[in-house]
Image (spheres, rainbow, N blue to C red):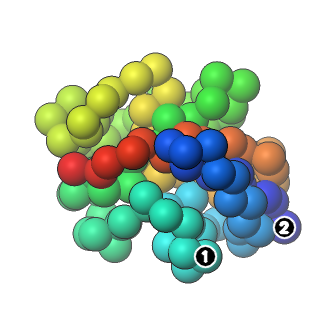
Amino acid sequence: MPKVIYIGDDGQEFAVDAPVGESVMAAAVKNGVPGIVGECGGNASCATCHVWVREEFASAVGLPGDMEEDLLDLAVSERRDGSRLSCQLTVTPDLDGLTVDVPPVQP
C-alpha cells in the first residue's frame, strides 16, 4: 500500500498507508491528519484540503484542472508552486512516498 507523508507547519510528520484509488485528502481525514479539513467531502468546492506538493513529486501528480485552479487562485491563503487540493490527488502505486506540506491555516 502506498505511503503518503504529511508534514505539518510545526514540522511534525504523519505517515499514512493510503489505498490505491483513494484521494490524498480522504486518507488524511480518515487517519486524523491535522490541518486537512475536507469540508466539502472531496467535491473540489471548498479548498480546505490545500497542500503543497514537494517538488520531487510535482510531475507525478500533474497539473491542476481548471476548477481546481480557480479554487487555488481564489480560496487558498498562500498559493505556492506545488499548491494542490488534496481531494484532487488520487493515490497510485507511483505516488508511494508522496510528501506534502500542510499549510498552517486552511480557508
Tell me where residue 84 sits by quadrant: top left
Whether residue 68 is visible, yes or no, is: yes
Mark 1, residue position: 31
Instruction: Choose between 64 and 107: the one closer to the eye.
Output: 107
Disc on the earlier residue, 1 or 2: 2
Instruction: Choose between 13 and 70: the one closer to the eye.
Output: 13
Q: Are marks 1 and 2 in contact (CB under 8 Å)?
A: no
Q: Which structural element holds mark 2? A: loop
Q: Is residue 73 left or right of residue 96?
A: left
Direction left: furthest residue: 74
The percent position of residue 43, horizontal first and vertical second, equals 30, 64
The percent position of residue 52, horizontal first and vertical second, equals 50, 35
Direction front: furthest residue: 10
Rendered residue at 49%/64% (across/down)? 34
**Which amino acid type is shown beneath numbered disc 1?**
Asn
Q: Is residue 47 above or below residue 58?
A: below
What is the tally of numbered marks visible in this picture?
2
Q: Is residue 15 left or right of residue 85?
A: right
Rendered residue at 64%/66% (across/down)? 21
Disc 2: CA contacts within 10 A as few (<14), some (14-19) or many (>=20)? few
The percent position of residue 85, horizontal first and vertical second, equals 40, 47
Distance between mark 1 and mark 2 Cα atoms? 15 Å
The percent position of residue 102, horizontal first and vertical second, equals 49, 46
Q: Is residue 94 above or below residue 42?
A: above
Q: Is residue 29 left or right of residue 92?
A: left
Q: Is residue 101 left or right of residue 81?
A: right
Rendered residue at 84%/67% (across/down)? 1
Mark 2, residue position: 1
**Which amino acid type is shown beneath numbered disc 2?**
Met
Q: Which structural element holds mark 1? A: loop
